[in-house]
Structures are given as structure tokens and as C-alpha cells.
Amino acid sequence: MSEPLIIALVLCSALVHAIWNAQVKGSSDRFATLVAIRCAGTIFGLAVLPFVPLPASASWPFLLGAAACHYVYYAFVLNAYRVGEFSQVYPIARGSAPLLVALLTLIFANEPLSPSTLIAIGLMSAGIALLASGGRGIEPVLYAIGTGVTIAAYSYLSGRGIRLAGNNLSYMASLEVLASVGMVVLGFTAMRKRVLVYLVPQWLTAITAGVLSVGGYMIALWAMTHASIAGVVALRETSALFGALIGAYVMKEGFGARRIAAAVLVVLGIVVYAL
């Protein structure tokens, strides 16, 4: 598989991730929107699983761990969007993940990182951190960092698991079901009225966000089977730049010279990684 194609697809995944997260942030009911997104994941998984073998047993500890981390991620991201601006909390959340994943991969996956990959990760992480600067209050930052930690955890576990699964599609479908069914059950039992009141008039937006979420993550998981886990995660974290642009020009949160300089660092990191 050619490296330019992998890079292009992961960048598409990054853009898609920023778009559906902006939809959650801008929603009048973020929990209901997230439930709708996870409905899409459940439907995808249940539609695929009857036609593929179960993931290999060696992948199940990683699969279950990744699914559990997703539920912690949902809690952090909903709280981050509740108290912070999108152009602040989204870049922090996405930017705190790459170095953590690189460290986990280096220590536990026996996957040494080349000097150029380390430089690329450093440039992108520095740029994303700079994008996040200038916000107000510590609470949004703490929730965003917590989100980043969970991103690093489920990305690492997913990357390890899919390499051991024996069938990529089987692993993807299983993960979607395990990482979604809890939210769906909660949404349509304890909070059914709230979810239905939101979804009836907003069904098209909810479906769009769900398709983007599932499709974007499938691309990232596939890429992890063809390139280093840390490299894919770092490249996907350039979604922070897309998030900052969306926050600035769609949500009207502002975008200054500091963030333009940060965008340059992110682009340099992408170039170094590609080379």
C-alpha cells in the first residue's frame, strides 16, 4: 500500500472527525447526538458480524479494553464541550494523544520510532498545543486532557488489537458494537424521551454524524495495519487544525496569529512524516 494514499486517507479521516465533533459541540442536545452516532456504529457492526468470523482470541483483551476506553472518552468529551469552546478543547484533546501513543507503542509494541517520525510527532504536537493556548479557565483544559488520554488509550489498544484479529472487518464491526451498545441502551431506556424528542426533527444531522464517525474511524483502523500506530494517530491528530478552523470561521470563536503559526507547525509535521 502506497504511503501517499495512506496519508491522504488518514487526513480525510481527520477532517471527518473534526466535522462530526463540531456537530456534537454545536448540537442543542450533545448526549442525544452522541447516542445517534453510536446507533450508526451499532447498526454497522450488527450488519457485518454475521458475515465474518469472530476476531482471533489474542485480540480480545485489546478489543475489550478499547471498547471500555471509548465509554470514558464519551464522558470526558461531553463535559469538555459543555464547559469549553470547540477551538480550545478540541485541539487540546487531539494534541495530547500522539506523544502518549508513541510512548506506549515504543514501550509495549516493540515498534521503535525513526528519528523523522519522532520529529514529525513533535512538530505536530507542538503546533496542536499552541492552537489550544489562549483559552480561559482550567476546567475545559482538564476535561480536554482527559479526553486526550482516553484517545491515546483506545488508539493504542485498537491498533494492537486489529493486528492480532485475523480479519480487519471483523475487528472493526466488533469494536463498533461493543463501544456503542452501552450508549444506545442508556439513550433508549433511561433517557428515551429526551433522545426521541431531539432525534425526530434532527434525524438527518444525526445520521450524517453517525456515518462520518464510523467511516472515519474505520479508515484510521485500516491505516494502523499498514503503518506505525503512533504515526497514524499523530497524522490523524491534525484534525485539531480542522477543528480550530471550524471553531474560528463556522462557530465564530476567533483565530489569531498564534494559531496560524501553530497551523504551520502542524503542516511541517505532516510533511516530515510523509517524507
Image (cartoon, grey):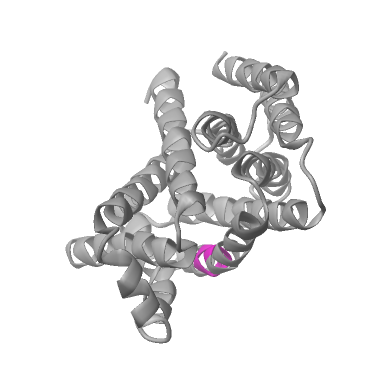
The picture places residue 41, in percent across and down from the top left corner, at 33, 60
Q: Quadrant of residue 105?
A: top right
The residue at the point 34 percent across, 67 percent down is 198
State the extent of the magenta-drawn residues as a range: 65-70
| 152 over 112 or under it: above or below | below
Q: Magenta stretch: residue 48 in it? A: no
Above or below residue 123? Residue 228 is below
- Quarter of the picture holding the N terminus: top left
Residue at 77% across, 56% down: 142
Residue in the image at 24% along x and 67% along y: 46
Can you say whether 21 is above or below 197 in the image? Answer: above
Q: Nearer the viewer, residue 1 or 88?
A: 88
Give the answer, above or below, for where 194 lies relative to 250: below
Q: Residue furthest left?
A: 51
Residue 181 seen from this side: yes
Residue 261 lies left or right of residue 156; in this view the side is right
Question: If the image is split into quadrants, where does the C terminus sit?
Answer: top right
* Main secondary structure found in the magenta portion: helix
Nearer to us in this view, 110 or 190: 190
Q: Where does the image place residue 224, in percent across and percent down from the top left?
A: 48, 41
Observer-nearest of 262 and 161: 262
Q: Position of residue 204 (x, y in %)?
A: 25, 52
Q: Is residue 226 left or right of residue 145?
A: left
Residue 59 x %, y %: 47, 62
Q: How many marks?
A: 0
Residue in the image at 35% along x and 81% along y: 192
- Inspect this view and state whether residue 224 appears: no
Quarter where residue 223 is shown: top left
